[in-house]
Image (tube, rainbow, N blue to C red):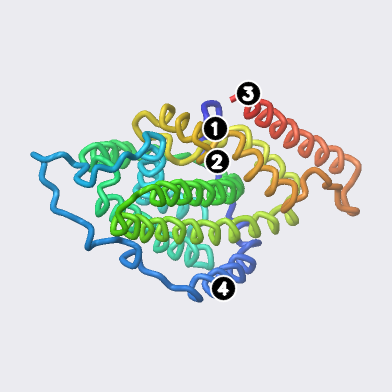
Amino acid sequence: MREGYDTTFVADPELLLDLKDTAGILMERHLAASNKNPWIPESYVPYSFATDYNPNEPWNVHGWDIPQWLDDALTVNLSTEDNLPYYSPDLDKMFGGESEWDAWNKRWTAEERRHSIVLRSGIMALRLVDPVKLEAEAMIQVSTGEVPKLTTPLDGMIYVALQELATFISHNNTANALEGFANSVVSKNQHNALSMFVGGIKRTGKDENLHYLFYKDICAEAYRLRPLEFLQSLARVIRYFEMPGTGIPDFKEKSERIAAAGIYSAKIHVEKVLEPVIFRQWHVDSYSSPKAATPVESQELEKARENVMRQYKLIKRVAAIT
């Protein structure tokens, strides 16, 4: 999270207990959707196109003319997935325990593992990115373990809901960009190999969208149960939100090129993530206090809602000039 966010963790076992049954229902829904179309990373990796790596020869054996922003997008997407060893313990700390939450965390970890495998294997088989550079950056990223830290389980749920949708969009736009590049390739074999990997990136994105749906709906239930705390957490997350790749070397420069190419930008974050979720899913802009709320409670809720709107408008203004 951005500078200024208090990362001192405060557990909330009561909230997790209150949401346990909903988590179980959403877990069953997720498994039904995920198991309907099972997949393995190897189905999307063009292994027949791969060659042995020789450090004494140019890494780009196929002569790809990949634009720098697409190199950046592939690198950032993979590096983000590579940091799985740090995400899982953090989620376990926020939502841990022998319950439906624990089952979800483990399933999420298993699915995220596949994403790292298919992205790395596809990139290496096709030689889309310099493997020495990629490994050096991965060593820095994973060695430092710099990932967003969340203050409360509720902050965590909201953050991951927004982040999973953002990741889906980033993967999907990267896949579309690589597909466009594949269509410019003359060789049929090269085109087919690239297209196979494009399918893997898109399949990864579908998983991320299913993860988003879980967190989006668990947040909706938390909003119903604890509207004031939810709105306070939402305002914090909107204000301090950062994607999980902040520990990647030259992340700022990479992000700027990725944004300029339309893969993921502040404008996309506002229009494709914040607005659809906080307005069309959680209806924060039209929220009214429960009938049982006292006048004081209603006033606090309205102040919290106004703060969410204030943070959103600030981010929107920043996005308009970047």
- Distance CA(mark 4)–CA(mark 2): 28 Å
User: Amino acid under label 3?
Assistant: Ile
Q: Residue furthest front?
A: 186
289 w.r.t. 97: above or below = above
User: Amino acid under label 1?
Assistant: Asp
Residue indicated by mark 3: 321
Q: Is residue 310 left or right of residue 290?
A: left
61 w.r.t. 48: above or below = above
- Distance CA(mark 1)–CA(mark 4): 34 Å
299 w.r.t. 18: above or below = above
- Distance CA(mark 3)–CA(mark 4): 43 Å
- Front residue (pair 162, 187): 187
Residue indicated by mark 2: 151
On residue 6, which mark appears? 1
Q: Residue at x 43, y 35 (%)?
A: 246
Q: Residue furthest left?
A: 56
Q: Residue at x 56, y 36 (%)?
A: 241
Q: Is residue 8 left or right of residue 72?
A: right
Sequence order check, earlier mark of 4 and 2? 4
Q: Quadrant of residue 193?
A: bottom left
**Mark 3 neighbour class, 10 Å CA radius: few under 14, some 14 to 19, many 20 or more:** few
On residue 28, which mark appears? 4
